[in-house]
Amino acid sequence: MLNLPSDSPAGSMNTDSNFAGVLAEGTNLSGYRNHILGTVSVWSIGVCTLLWICLLGVLTADYYGKLPGWRYGKDFSLAFESDYLLLATFLILWGISFIICVSLFILKPYLRNYFRLLTLPADGQYVCAVRPLNEIKVMEDNANKLQRSINTFSERLRTRLGRDKEYTTCPIEKTSEGRIYFTYQCTRYVFDEQTQQYAPYEFDLGTSHRRLIQQADGLSGAEVAYRLELVGPNFIEVKVPSIPAAFVREFVSFFYLYQLMILWIYYVYAYWQVGLVDTGVILLSASIKVALRVQSERRLKQMAEQEETTPVKRDGEWLNVSTRDLVPGDVIEVTTGAHMSCDCVLLSGNAIMNESSLTGEPLPIRKFPVRIDDSHYNVAEAGKMSTLFAGTVVSQVQPVTKSTDSLESDRVLALVRFTGTMSDKGQLVRRILFPNPISFIFNEQMRIV
């Protein structure tokens, strides 16, 4: 921990800064550590599964007499030229392969951690966050009796198999000062030694206008380093997979697993023409879906990963700093044309903001500075007119050099309140990236089909 001045707002963890709370309700954390035997076991399962599928390929080639070497041109050579024995062997191996693939699909969320050593979250190398999935069902009231019965059965089955929860394993990292944390859903969760829990960190900048204006002198370099260690960079990283990785992500779903295993039977029973057509249709639909999904993720990445240079007051001097390094409590200069990367409170001057990217409102919104009084600042009420939200664009600014009820300055000043996913834009991006599943009436009816 850095040694900060005693009168610094960041100098005490119990007064002006605190943990914002624990994880979402119902989310549980478990710690895990790697072990050499567990790593070998996981790789062994993967290799054995691939070899088993390769064996099916060998039997399929033998059915058509396509095995290389002296067997080439001889049908059913592995089964002593017996059609019945080869097909029976194939069906047995195919059934075992199907069971293996389905088992791996069901166990996929927690298979890797099963071969790790369970420990406390603070002592492990990884943290597994288990979050309940609250599925949103659209037009559920239109379901008939049969559909409701099937939905009830499927819900019980999902709960029994553990598919009603989301499992996310995050590596535990350390800051330059040795503080441990992990990043979950683009948010940094820091370990609190007092409560022995992980939680996002939040700095209390005050709730009165006068308290906010008193911080107009900005932060020191030591305070910035301390706060950056706790809240992380003001940057939301959106990972877009490569095209091969996107195809792998698409084909690991149960729908494609079921389709490909069924098509394998077509290839063996001399219906390879039908199998090729069905495979082509599946590959075409998957390609279209992958292309649309990757395109949407790239657009979201472009919207979320915003970084530019802005004037910031630190140690009493104005510096040009990347918006990535902004922390709560920083005082920045608002300039015309700037893209706000964090939620701020307007301390001095007026600003006209374009908030269409967040609210869809085409008309510009005028923002006023907070007054020098003891009024309560509430962003949900009157404080909204003094708040500059992340994701909005500054259309015009007007410094105020003479005023009786607001801060005077030749610059338009704003105090940073929230950064990253704690900002209004960050919350929106987080809901887009990690939504709750939605089931439409069509999905419910497909279960009956």
Image: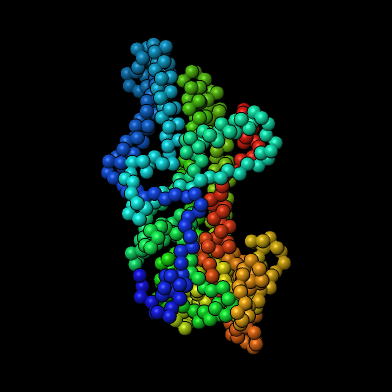
- Res. 383 image quadrant: bottom right
Please, which residue is most extreme toward the left here?
Answer: 36
Q: 400 above or below 260?
A: below
- Image quarter in which the C terminus is found: top right
Rendered residue at 53%/34% (across/down)? 156
Q: Position of residue 358 (x, y in %)?
A: 64, 61
Q: Position of residue 204 (x, y in %)?
A: 50, 71
Viewer-nearest residue: 317 or 220: 220
Please, which residue is most extreme toward the right here?
Answer: 363
Q: Position of residue 130 (x, y in %)?
A: 45, 47
**Count of marks placed on residues:** 0
Determine whether, in the image, residue 300 is placed left or right of residue 355: left
Determine whether, in the image, residue 13 is placed left or right of residue 403: left
Q: Position of residue 347 (x, y in %)?
A: 59, 78
Viewer-nearest residue: 114 or 302: 114
- Image quarter in which the N terminus is found: bottom left
Is residue 297 visible in the rendered structure shown here? no
Q: 152 above or below 338?
A: above
Rendered residue at 55%/23% (across/down)? 274
Q: 231 above or below 154?
A: below
Rendered residue at 55%/35% (across/down)? 155
